[in-house]
Image: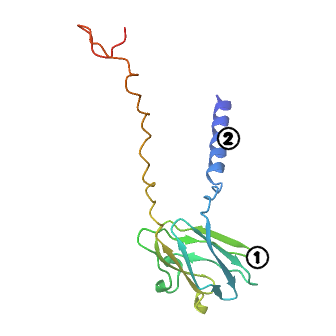
Amino acid sequence: MSRCWLMLAMLAVFSLFLAGCPRQPEEPGEIGEEVEITEYQFQPQEARIKQGEAVRWNNAGQETHTVTADPARAQERANVQLPEGAKTFDSGEIEPGGSFVHTFDTPGTYRYICVLHEDQNMVGTVIVEPAEPEQAPAEQAPAEEAPAEEPGTQEPQTEQPGREPGAME
């Protein structure tokens, strides 16, 4: 009986271990814009992409930075803006030479900050334009009609009592 409890305890510990493992990140959308992070600024300061595309931020500076669109993490809430229905995001610390990619699924204007350098006005903007509506397939050409048979080549249909026309024997 004690072996059974030991096995259950080991299984529980292993399950807790797996629950704490980080999940694989979602596949990013197509990169629509690249933003270079330099000392205390994002270049370009305003990026413009289409809905479903991603932005890649590359830290080309000598210091650690973040890309954060979460009003709860901002010193000045007005420095962070999200469209209605959009989820917050935060890169965590991006070391020099590192990068961060985020896919934007909700159209609108996003203002984001570097949490570490917000006091030095390190703020950027991403404008996400709605995706172009899927175009309806081009009008299909009418289906080709079967070639008309030559007059006199069609077999005559004869009706037999108790049978429907064209019924097979």
- Amino acid under label 1? Gly
Image quadrant in which the N terminus is located: top right
Residue holding disc 2: 10
Q: Residues within 10 Å of mark 1 (few under 14, many from 20)?
A: few
Q: Where is residue 126 in the image (x, y as percent from the top left)?
A: 54, 78
User: Which is nearer the N-term, disc 1 or disc 2?
Assistant: 2
3D distance between C-alphas at marks 1 and 2: 41 Å
Identify the secondary structure beneath mark 1: loop
Q: Residues within 10 Å of mark 2 (few under 14, many from 20)?
A: few
Q: Position of residue 75 (x, y in %)?
A: 52, 85
Q: Which colour scheme is used?
A: rainbow
The residue sitting at 58% across, 91% down in the picture is 121
Image quadrant in which the C terminus is located: top left
Q: Is residue 30 left or right of residue 145?
A: right
Q: In this view, does 157 lie above or below 150?
A: above
- Amino acid under label 2? Met
Q: In this view, does 4 lie above or below 137?
A: above
Q: In this view, does 70 lie to the left or right of 60?
A: left
The residue sitting at 47% across, 66% down in the picture is 132
The residue sitting at 67% across, 45% down in the picture is 14
Residue holding disc 1: 97
Disc number lying in front (1 or 2): 1
Kindly identify which numbered label has been placed on residue 51.
none
